[in-house]
Image: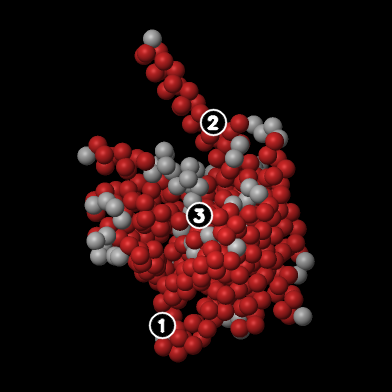
Amino acid sequence: MEYLLLFVATVLVNNFVLVQFLGICPFLGVSKQVSTSVGMGIATTFVMVMAALASWLIQHFILIPLGLQYLQTLSFILVIAALVQLVEMFLHKSIPGLYRAMGIFLPLITTNCAVLGLALNAMLRNYNLGESLVYGFGAGVGFTLALILIAGIREEIQFADIPKPLKGQAIALIIAGLLSLAFSGFAGMI
Amino acid sequence: MNRMIKDFLRGLWDEHPTFRIMIGMCPTLAVTTTALNGLGMAAATTFVLICSSVLISMLKRVIPAGVRIPAYIVVIATFVTTVDYFMLAKSPELHQALGVFIPLIVVNCIILGRAEAYASKMPVHFAAIDALGMGLGFTWALTLIGAIRELLGSGTVFGFAVMPDGFAPIKILTSPPGAFITLGVLLALMNVVSDRIAQKTKARQEKAAS
């Protein structure tokens, strides 16, 4: 029950993208088509769960016993970079279509602040291993949800008559604002 | 010399990191609830950007091409940790307000982007000037967004009350949706301004030609 609550809170109430502003770059960059968004979301979710696991193990078996907490940021980002490389190699070999579709944004999962933010937040809140994993999965699902929502809307307005200065990212940001407004309605839920 | 000035100015407008290239968006949206928070965040980022650009430029012959990205990340993360602990010691309130976004400077695409695209190929003084320009560009953007949200959302700028008594704050601007909407509107305004400038230059050129 606790885990379910944590999951719902992470996906909806504290949505990583729309409420906490983590992972805005891919959110604005790869959200032009629903199909690429789904792929990007799944890849990111996978990296997030792995990162939650790896960062928990590093924190509790290496950094704390050796008193090296000041190396937290450094070690987490390196582990995440290695994980992303792994996912990239896997996709390149087994799903080349998806690999091509994601193009430049795949290596950019490393610099997706949602992944590092998740690892740091989980340590800050002293989550145990189970909670960390649920938190990581919830963060990934929330990210995917936000990405698919905005991609769907952007596909719809592609042929709409938007005032010229608003075209492109400006209108995307305003749509994101309205989505964020909708998500703030979840605030009182838990 | 001219080249240096050009490189410096590039970050302030033509290749502005926030409004043109749209990188480093997470802190831009998240911590700009007040002008002071925006300025603090931008100052920390600028410091890391300059230090790491200079160091990476110095080390460009030492770092093997195959592992350059992890090497850059290590350099950047070192400076970020320095800033993190410095801020915790000197200004705990600001550290509290910026929260997780200070360690997240590591993954700010502006820094890695400049390291990869510029600092790793250029001599030290060019790298420093370029980093300073980009950092100041980022700083004016974050301070401006913070000031607008603070002014309309709570009627103050840098903590000083500036609005008249009858002013009812638009609370939503200090909450997450307000960040997206403020930036969206600012981007649209920027587009209008640069369109005007482009038209004027074009008209002037045509006049000169005829």
Q: Amino acid at mark 3?
A: Ile
Give the color scheme: rainbow, by chain, secondary structure or one colour: secondary structure
Chain of the residue on which disc 3 is drawn: A
Q: Quadrant of residue B189?
A: top right
Cα separation, mark 3 vs mark 2, equals 30 Å
- Mark in front: 3 vs 1: 3
Q: Is residue A10 left or right of residue A100?
A: right
Residue A52 is marked as none
The answer to whether mark 3 and mark 1 are in CB contact below 8 A is: no
Q: Mark 3, residues whose alpha carbon is within 10 Å: few (<14), some, or many (≥20)?
A: few
Whether labels 1 and 2 belong to a single chain: the reply is no
Task: Say what secondary structure mark 2 lies in.
Answer: helix
Look at mark 3 in the image and give the residue it sits on: A104
Mark number, residue A68: 1
x and y, in percent, of residue B18 in the image: 48, 47
Residue at the outermost top position: B210
Residue furthest toward the left?
A: B1
Q: Is residue B1 visible?
A: yes
Residue drawn 55% across and 68% down?
A: A90
Question: Which label is found at residue B192?
Answer: 2
Which of B19/A155 is in front? A155
In 3D space, how far apart are the residues under numbered discs 3 and 1 (Cα atoms)?
34 Å
Task: Tell me if residue A21 can be seen.
Answer: no
Q: Nearer the viewer, residue B76 or A137?
A: A137
Q: Position of residue A126 (x, y in %)?
A: 58, 81
